[in-house]
Amino acid sequence: MGQRNHPNRQDVIKNIDRELERIEKDQEWLDELVQGFEQMDQVIPHSAPPSIHDLEQLVSSHKVEIRRQNRLELLCFFIVACILIGGNTFLAMTSWTAFLILQACTFVGAITYLWYSRNGAKKKGAAPHAE
């Protein structure tokens, strides 16, 4: 029968002592941490949570601000749309060839932009398994 390699009794005692020292250090560290949290609790003033009325007022004022921003954005959209439509209409009435050239250039530019943005996105996030 083979002999088992049992650790020496002194080695076991040393390991237990090391483990106890580690546990004591951990406990000291935890005690310091708890003491630090208690000091922070004493230094930081405790404030009462805001009332429901204050929160409702904050939400309603934020909604009003968002509505105002949305109206301004919509107004800007309509102004730009009117300028573009009016400009194109004026150009079509005055010079039909210039209007067609502008439309063709815009179309080619849009297709080119879409092509390069599509290919650029593939190169940036190129994942071999996604192709």
Image (cartoon, grey):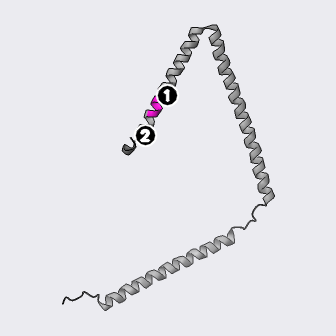
Residue at left offset 42%, top offset 38%: 122
Q: Is residue 64 above or below residue 58?
A: above
Quadrant housing residue 91 = top right
**Residue sitting at the far right:** 53
Q: Which mark is residue 38?
A: none
Q: In this view, does 100 lie to the left or right of 123?
A: right
Residue at the image position 64 percent from the left and 74 percent from the top = 38
- Looking at the picture, how far across and down is residue 85, in whole percent? 66, 20
User: Which residues lie in the magenta part?
Assistant: 112-118
User: Residue 1 appears at what percent x and percent y?
Assistant: 18, 90
In the rendered image, the vertical position of residue 102 relative to residue 55, given as above or below? above
Return the disc, 1 or 2, that comes first in the chain's sequence.
1
Q: Judge whether 80 appears above or below 51 on screen.
A: above
x 39%, y 86%: residue: 16
Whether pointer 1 and pointer 2 mark residues with C-beta atoms closer than 8 Å, the reply is no
Q: Is the magenta stretch mostly helix, strand or loop?
A: helix
The residue tagged with tag 2: helix, strand or loop? helix
Looking at the picture, tell me which residue is in the foreground, 61 or 47. Answer: 61
Residue at label 1? 113
- Magenta-span inclusion, residue 104: no
Closest to the observer: 85 or 68? 85
Residue under numbered circle 2: 124
Query: Which residue is at a point 25% across and 86% down the rendered structure image?
Result: 5
- Give the left or right position of residue 99, taking residue 3 as reference: right
Mark 2: few/some/many CA within 10 Å (<14, 14-19, 20+): few
**Three-letter residue code for mark 1:** Tyr
Which x, y percent locates residue 20? Answer: 44, 85
- The type of residue carrying mark 2 is Lys
Q: Which quadrant is home to the C terminus? A: top left
Crowding at dot 1, Cα within 10 Å, few <14 / some 14-19 / many 20+, comes out as few
**Badge 1 element:** helix
